[in-house]
């Protein structure tokens, strides 16, 4: 018989029954869109449309529309790419790694976190595709397709190509993982609905009937997918870091990059999950499912990964000094005290100092403080990538070619476009899909609810 | 689908009662058609006597296929079809092939296994499930027993067995 341990916080409060779970979560999908949702959705579509002007301009005129110059050949585009991919790490980490560790608190947040992952990866993929200049030819550069030049194949020695495989595998496996979890919940909505809604959710639910045999297979699939997705999620940001680490640019050429990027990715991903979940739980009245306990646990992950990132910054700096390589030492001194000192210190403040506030229980259990700090972390993580990319490039080997990077309106616009895309997709998801995995939450109602039954 | 297939259904509210009930019902010599639940009930496949799923084997085989395809593709393209000197390295720079090999292994293992799962469980967008009770996807567990298969026991006896095992309701269901 399941009994909740008295030391462990309940994961579901308010004495919810199975029926309450179905009702509380399906309600959003079934109700008419609220005014607040409509306004937020229209705002995101507006941002998307405004941003798409910059996107079309960039595609029409070429990437000369961006502020890149011959010294700084990568700037906002790759910064934004790495930032979005990093955000896209929390979802699969929550659903896969926490599943392997049998962390039941994942169940209330995994659905939305995975959705966020998928949308963030879509936004990330925009940047390398646009950066190709002529994306309609991009398939020949990115995929091993037969062509009339030989065939002259893609270069499998290049980390940029590994990235193509890593990101596309990550995207598709995360999508499948997410969808498999959605099938039983679509069936729940199907069985409550009538008319056209019944046919739509019926098709989405793939004819799910809840048979014990199917559930048993489903559990096996979830476990194996988690086992596959765990090394996958670690590989993605490792390979993203190879884009830098395998080059010979001072400031990039370091072996600490893979673990440091992975920790940073989890750090920023959890921050974005918190930003979104704090709003979602409030708007959809899900406080009984996404409790302060959940928020606190996520904040603890943020302290840990934030501290790993902090140690990585210091180690990187120490190794630059210890290596005795003048160019490497200069790159790091230039980061701290060069013309981009403000970016470096913003990064340090936002990523290393501010998350330490979560050591105070009052702060890590406060919704307002968590929300604000989650935004701060995401700003800090954007600066981290900007610092790594731009400050390592802008003063290269010849002082005569030293330059600064200034973003143009197109740089800003394309970044805005991805924000519009991300929030548009997220709002659509939040309205039409169940935001919490009902089936999984139901499986812990008895053991982890406030009210212990039997 | 056979016509006039009649089922007797035991409806249960609680997963632990259900697990005991399955053992009791099977102990009475009743053959259970299937048990339907709103969420995965741990240990249900053991009491129902289901064998362990072979999906992990499918995942492994598809993964091996992915590894083989990825390595073959890279060696063929880089070493045989169009060898090029890149950074003075060997044409077949094996360590460089590992990331893509890993990704394709994971990709094929995941998609292959999910494909097998879909086919084995008959999950498809146009699938029309037989819904024994709409509350299955909400809050009730339903044990379906095929009357034709258990004709030796009779409806009355089956109903008694279900009730004594803790079913909150006993219903009948026929499918066209």
Image (cartoon, coloured by chain):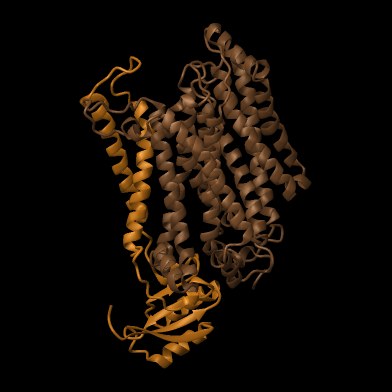
Residue drawn at x 36%, y 63% is: B125
Residue drawn at x 42%, y 91% is: B157
User: Quick one: which residue is furthest to the bottom in this view?
Assistant: B156
Choose top left, top right, bottom left or bottom right for residue B87. top left
Q: Who is closer to the viewer here, B103 or A372?
A: A372
The chain in brown: A
| Residue A259 in view in this figure | no
Q: Who is closer to the viewer here, B175 or B142?
A: B175
Quadrant where the C terminus of chain A is found in the figure: bottom right
The chain in orange: B
Q: Who is closer to the viewer here, A22 or A219?
A: A22
| Residue A345 in view in this figure | yes
Q: Give how far across and how far down residue B50 sits, in percent.
A: 38, 67
Quadrant where the N terminus of chain A is found in the figure: bottom right
Compared with A328, A17 (above or below) is: below
Choose top left, top right, bottom left or bottom right for residue B16. bottom right
In the image: residue A383, left or right of residue B80: right
Q: Give how far across and how far down residue A301 sits, in percent.
A: 64, 43
In the image: residue A112, left or right of residue B69: right
Q: Give how far across and how far down residue A354 sits, in percent.
A: 72, 35
Q: Give how far across and how far down residue A3 sits, in percent.
A: 64, 66
Compared with B171, A124 (above or below) is: above
Q: Who is closer to the viewer here, B40 or A243?
A: A243
Compared with A92, A17 (above or below) is: below
The count of marks equals 0
Compared with A249, A429 (above or below) is: below
Residue drawn at x 46%, y 20% is: A247
In the image: residue B43, left or right of residue B7: right
């Amino acid at each position: 018989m399941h009994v909740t341990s008295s030391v462990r916080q309940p994961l579901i409060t308010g004495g919810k029954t199975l029926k309450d779970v179905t009702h509380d979560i399906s309600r959003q999908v079934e109700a008419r869109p609220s005014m607040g949702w409509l306004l937020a959705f229209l705002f995101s579509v507006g941002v998307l449309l405004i941003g798409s002007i910059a996107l079309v301009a960039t595609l029409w005129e070429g990437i000369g529309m961006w502020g890149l110059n011959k010294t700084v050949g990568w700037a906002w585009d790759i910064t934004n790419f790495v930032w979005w991919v990093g955000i896209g790490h929390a979802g699969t980490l929550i659903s896969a790694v926490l599943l392997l560790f049998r962390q039941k608190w994942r169940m209330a947040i995994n659905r939305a976190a995975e959705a966020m992952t998928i949308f963030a990866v879509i936004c990330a993929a925009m940047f390398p595709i646009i950066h190709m200049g002529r994306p309609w030819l991009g398939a020949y550069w990115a995929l091993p397709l037969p062509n009339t030049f030989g065939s002259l194949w893609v270069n499998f020695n290049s980390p940029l190509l590994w990235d193509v495989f890593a990101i596309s595998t990550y995207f598709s496996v995360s999508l499948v993982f997410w969808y498999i979890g959605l099938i039983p919940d679509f069936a729940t909505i199907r069985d409550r609905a009538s008319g056209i809604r019944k046919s739509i959710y019926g098709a989405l639910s793939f004819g799910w009937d809840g048979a014990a045999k199917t559930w048993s297979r489903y559990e096996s699939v979830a476990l194996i997918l988690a086992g596959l997705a765990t090394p996958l999620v670690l590989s993605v940001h490792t390979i993203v870091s190879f884009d830098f680490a395998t080059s010979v640019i001072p400031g990039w050429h370091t072996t600490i990059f893979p673990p440091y990027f992975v920790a940073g990715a989890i750090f920023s991903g959890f921050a974005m999950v918190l930003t979104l979940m704090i709003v979602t739980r409030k708007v959809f009245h899900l406080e009984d499912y996404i409790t302060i306990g959940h928020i606190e646990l996520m904040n603890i992950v943020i302290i840990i990964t934030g501290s790993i990132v902090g140690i990585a910054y210091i180690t990187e700096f120490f190794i630059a000094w210890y290596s005795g390589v003048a160019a490497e030492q200069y790159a790091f001194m230039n980061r701290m005290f060069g013309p981009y000192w403000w970016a470096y210190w913003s990064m340090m403040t936002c990523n290393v100092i501010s998350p330490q506030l979560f050591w105070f229980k009052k702060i890590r259990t406060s919704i307002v403080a968590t929300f604000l700090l989650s935004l701060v972390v995401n700003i800090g993580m954007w600066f981290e990538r900007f610092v790594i990319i731009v400050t390592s490039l802008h003063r290269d080997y010849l002082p005569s070619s030293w330059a600064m990077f200034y973003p143009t309106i197109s740089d800003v616009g394309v970044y805005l476009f991805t924000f519009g895309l991300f929030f548009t997709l997220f709002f659509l998801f939040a309205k039409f899909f169940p935001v919490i995995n009902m089936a999984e939450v139901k499986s812990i109602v008895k053991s982890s609810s406030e009210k212990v039954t039997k | 689908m056979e016509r006039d297939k009649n089922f007797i259904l035991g409806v249960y509210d609680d997963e632990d009662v259900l697990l005991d009930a399955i053992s009791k019902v099977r102990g009475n010599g009743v053959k259970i058609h299937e048990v339907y639940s709103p969420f995965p009930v741990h240990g249900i496949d053991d009491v129902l006597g289901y064998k362990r799923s072979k999906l992990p084997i499918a995942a492994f085989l598809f993964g091996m296929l992915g590894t083989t395809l990825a390595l073959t593709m890279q060696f063929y393209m880089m070493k045989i079809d169009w060898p090029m000197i890149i950074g003075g390295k060997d044409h077949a720079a094996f360590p460089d092939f590992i990331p893509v090999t890993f990704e394709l292994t994971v990709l094929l293992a995941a998609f292959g296994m999910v494909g097998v799962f879909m086919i084995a469980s008959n999950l498809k967008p146009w699938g029309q499930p037989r819904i024994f009770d709409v509350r299955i996807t909400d809050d009730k567990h339903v044990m379906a027993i095929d009357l034709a298969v258990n004709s030796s026991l009779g409806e009355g006896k089956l109903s008694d067995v279900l009730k004594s095992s803790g079913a909150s309701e006993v219903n009948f269901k026929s499918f066209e």
